[in-house]
Amino acid sequence: MERRKHLDNYLGVAGWAKGGRYGIERYLFFLHRISGLGLIVYLLMHIYVTGARIYGAEAWEASMAAVSGPLFKFGEYLVMAAFVFHALNGIRLVLIELGIGIGKPERQEYPYVSSVMKQRPLMWVLMALVAVLLVVSGLDFFVL
C-alpha cells in the first residue's frame, strides 16, 4: 500500500521536463540541466579528440579531419549556445540566491505577490542578452 502511494505522485521524465503551473522559470531550469549535460558531453569529446595529439601528427590530422564537416560546425554553434545560456542563466540564479533582483521583503497582503513576479524582469533582460549573443555569434559562425 505504501508503494502505491509513492507511485501516484511519480511523474518520471515528463515531470522533469514539464513546466506545469510553475511557468517559464521551470523551463529555464530544464534547459539549464540540458545545457549543463551537453557541456559535459562536449568536454569529454574535446578531451578525446585533442588526446589524439599524443599519437603523432598523423593521428592529430585524422581526428581534426573527422570533426571539420558542416555538421560539426553546427555542433560547435550549439555548444557555444549552450555555454552562453548556461552562463547567463547561472548568473541570474546566483543573483537571485543573493537576494538581488527580488526586491525587499514586505508584509504579505492579499493579493499575494510572489517573488517569482519580482525576479521576472531580470530573467527577461538576461534572456534577451542570450538571444542577442546567439544572433551575433550565429552571424560570426555562418555568415562572416
Image (spheres, rainbow, N blue to C red):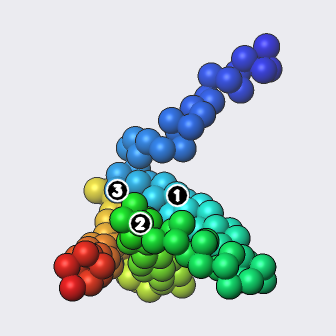
Give the residue displayed 55% in from the left and 75% down from the top.
Answer: 64
Q: Quadrant of residue 128?
A: bottom left
Mark sitting earlier along the chain (3/2): 3
Asked whether, in this view, residue 111 is left or right of residue 59, the answer is: left
Between residue 32 and residue 106, name the one nearer to us. 32
Report the mark closest to the observer, 2 or 1.
Answer: 2
> Disc 1 on helix, strand or loop?
helix
- Do we see residue 94 in this rendering? yes
- Do we see residue 40 in this rendering? no
Which residue position is annotated with label 3? 24
> Disc 2 on helix, strand or loop?
loop
Give the residue displayed 19% in from the left and 79% down from the top.
Answer: 143
Q: Return the x and y of residue 51 as percentages of the image width and height.
A: 73, 78
Label 2 to label 1: alpha-carbon separation: 24 Å
Between residue 129 and residue 59, name the one nearer to us. 59
Label 3 to label 1: alpha-carbon separation: 15 Å
Amino acid type, residue under disc 1 in the picture: Ile
Amino acid type, residue under disc 2 in the picture: Gly
Asked whether, in this view, residue 75 is left or right of residue 47, the answer is: left
Q: Return the x and y of residue 62 as percentages of the image width and height.
A: 60, 72
Residue most extreme to the top: 1
Mark sitting earlier along the chain (3/1): 3
Mark sitting earlier along the chain (2/1): 1
> Disc 3 on helix, strand or loop?
helix
Answer yes or no: do the residues labelled 3 and 1 have beta carbons within 8 Å? no
Label 3 to label 2: alpha-carbon separation: 35 Å
Which residue position is annotated with label 2? 69
Give the residue displayed 36% in from the left and 65% down from the top.
Answer: 70
Which residue position is annotated with label 1? 34
Q: Return the x and y of residue 26 as percentages of the image width and height.
A: 44, 54
